[in-house]
Each structure stands twice: as C-alpha cells, then as structure tokens.
Amino acid sequence: MVTAVPVPEPARLLDSAALSRLGHDLRSPLTGIIGLAGLMRRKITCGGADPVQQDRQLQLIADSATGLLATIERVVALAKLETRDDEPPGSTDCGTVAAEVVAELTPAAVEHGRRLHASTGPAPAAITPAAARLIVTELLDNAIKYSTEADIEVTVTGAAISVADHGPGLPAGEQQRIFQPFERGTAAEEREVAGSGLGLALAQRATVRHGGTLGMATGPDGTVFTVTLPRA
C-alpha cells in the first residue's frame, strides 16, 4: 500500500548547505579529470604510454566531463526557474510529450534493467513544451536510477502525469529531504548510483512555476509521483 506524503515547498536553491553539496559534486569529477590528465602526461613524458590504457583513461575523462556538464546544466535550469521571465505557457499535449520522453529514455532504462510502460492520451495543459519535457524526464530518470524493481509505469490522463515504480518506498526521514537541491536518498549513496540530487527539485520547481502541484505517495509497494497541471 502506498500512502500520500506532503511535498514541501520549493527550497532556496543555494543556501549554505546546498553550496557545500554543489562544491562536492563539482569537485569530484574535476579531481578525477586533473588526476588522469596528470597521469597520462607523466607516462607520455617517461615514454611508458600504453595506447589501450590511454584510450580507457580518455574515456574516463570524457565521462567525468560529461557528468560535470550535466550538473552545471541542471543548476542553470534551476536558476532559470527562479526568474520571472518565462515565456507564456500556451498549450502543450502532455500525453505526446510523455510518449516521446519514454521512447528517448528506453535505452537508459534497458541498461538499468528496467521496463517502461506508458499509458498516455491527449492531455492539453497550460505549460510550455520545454517545461513539460523537463518534468517527465526528471521524474522518469529518477525512477530508472533508483527503483529496485524492473517495471516503471508512466500514466497521463487529463492534465495529470504519474510516474510509478515498485521499489521499497522511501523512509520517513527522507520523504521531505529528497526535494532539496543536491540531496539524495541513503539508498542512492549506498548503491553508488550516479546523480546530482537535482532531478526532483527541478521537477517540483517547473511544476509550481506553471501553477501545478506535485504529489508523492510511497510505501512498501513503491513510490508514485503525480504532477497535476492547469488544463489548457
């Protein structure tokens, strides 16, 4: 049984705790990039460079840089959501957007051993296409990374978007914290799942900025995030 949980109001983007976590998230990949670059340079200088090993190290550098760029892009997206210069929301069919995002994220889901199931229909809502895509992407990415079961359902009906997994649910002490920027659940840390802790904060801010609400229900049967938007 899943139980509805109150979702806190969006927190400040960069309070002192968030700044500390951001510094850690930026420092780790940068340290890896600098260390590997130095190692490669020393081996080239000493004439002991191994082409196969160099290729592997270059891939590690590229992966670290890609993760760093993704974190920075999400921070920029969060900052933009706190400004007042949004484009007019217009009307977006969230059913179409959700189906597109499911298709785009299916390869990542397969890589994580997940199966995505989509049930979508026409769902015009007063939101920009970019914001609708961001919300669905972040909620689905969160489920793919942190669920412990294979099946994930995406349902769009009316002006509501739901993403449900069948994992163990969230402990009471984490149900509020996971919406804070740069915060991640204990399970994510223990399983060493890569992530910046910005996905749910982004989804929440984008929802609230467009006059919607984000609800969460969690329990031993899994977790369901539901976004309800104004109808167009």
Image: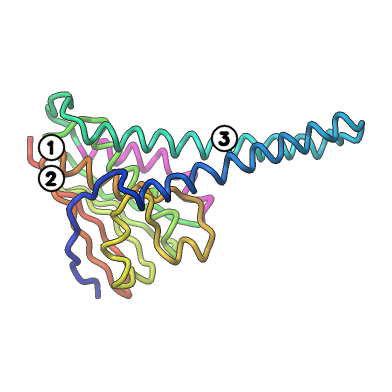
Q: Is residue 98 magenta?
A: yes
Mark 1 lies on residue? 125
In the image, the segment drawn in magenta is 94-112
Mark 3 lies on residue? 65
Above or below, 106 against 55 in this view is below
Q: Amino acid at mark 2?
A: Gly
Mark 2 lies on residue? 212
User: What distance separates the C-alpha of mark 3 from that of mark 2?
Assistant: 34 Å
Tag 2 and tag 1, C-beta contact below 8 Å: yes
Please identify, in this view, whether the residue under mark 3 or under mark 2 is nearer the observer.
3
Q: Secondary structure at mark 3?
A: helix
Front position in the image: 137 or 24: 24
Answer with left or right where residue 191 lies relative to residue 171.
right
What secondary structure is the magenta-colored segment mainly? Answer: helix
Q: Residue at x 41, y 61 (%)?
A: 147
Front position in the image: 213 or 182: 182
Q: Position of residue 39 (x, y in %)?
A: 77, 38
Q: Is residue 86 magenta?
A: no
Precedes in sequence: disc 3 or disc 1: 3
